Image: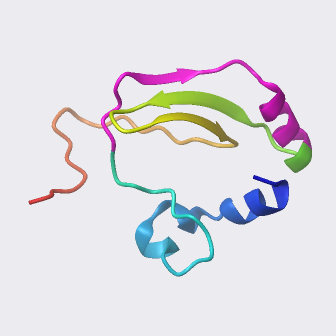
Amino acid sequence: MPEEIWRVFLDDRLIDQETGAELDGYVWGVMWHCLYSGAKILPESEATRRWSKALGIDFHEVRIETNAHDLILRFSGLQVSEVQVGYVPFVVE
């Protein structure tokens, strides 16, 4: 994705279907995935160096394997929260 497009996708409203539905961009939020077999931080790559230089902020890379996707995620910021055992963010009936 070219840098010009990436700048548009930095809008935090695109992480939630409710706030991002009317925006011209891809809504990243999917509510949940089973994290199997897990996530792994990758070493610095040419791609993360290029993005960091182009946008002037640090970029990182992680590989996330879920029950549905095998993703390489390049990002400039990440928030991780610990939740209690049994936490249920939503219920599907």
Q: Position of residue 55 (x, y in %)?
A: 86, 49
Residue at the far top in the pictured view: 43
For the C terminus, the image quarter is bottom left
Which image quadrant for residue 43?
A: top right
Location of residue 51 with respect to 61 vertically, above or below: below
Q: Position of residue 57 (x, y in %)?
A: 82, 43
Report the side of 27 relative to 84 (left or right). right
Magenta stretch encompasses residue 50: yes
Q: Residue at x 77, y 62 (%)?
A: 5
Q: Is residue 65 above or below residue 43?
A: below
Query: Which residues are drawn in magenta?
Result: 33-53
Closer to the camera, 81 or 28? Answer: 28
Closer to us: 14 or 37: 37
| Residue sitting at x 48%, y 74% | 19
Count of numbered badges drawn on the protein: 0
- Estimate the x, y position of residue 39 in percent, counting from the top left: 47, 25
The residue under the point 21% across, 56% down is 90
- The scheme the figure's colours follow is rainbow
- Is 21 contained in the magenta span? no
Residue at position x 43%, y 68% in the image: 17
Q: Is residue 70 above or below residue 51?
A: above
Image quadrant of residue 74? top right
State the image quarter where residue 92 is shown: bottom left
| Direction left: furthest residue | 93
Viewer-side residue, 71 vs 48: 71
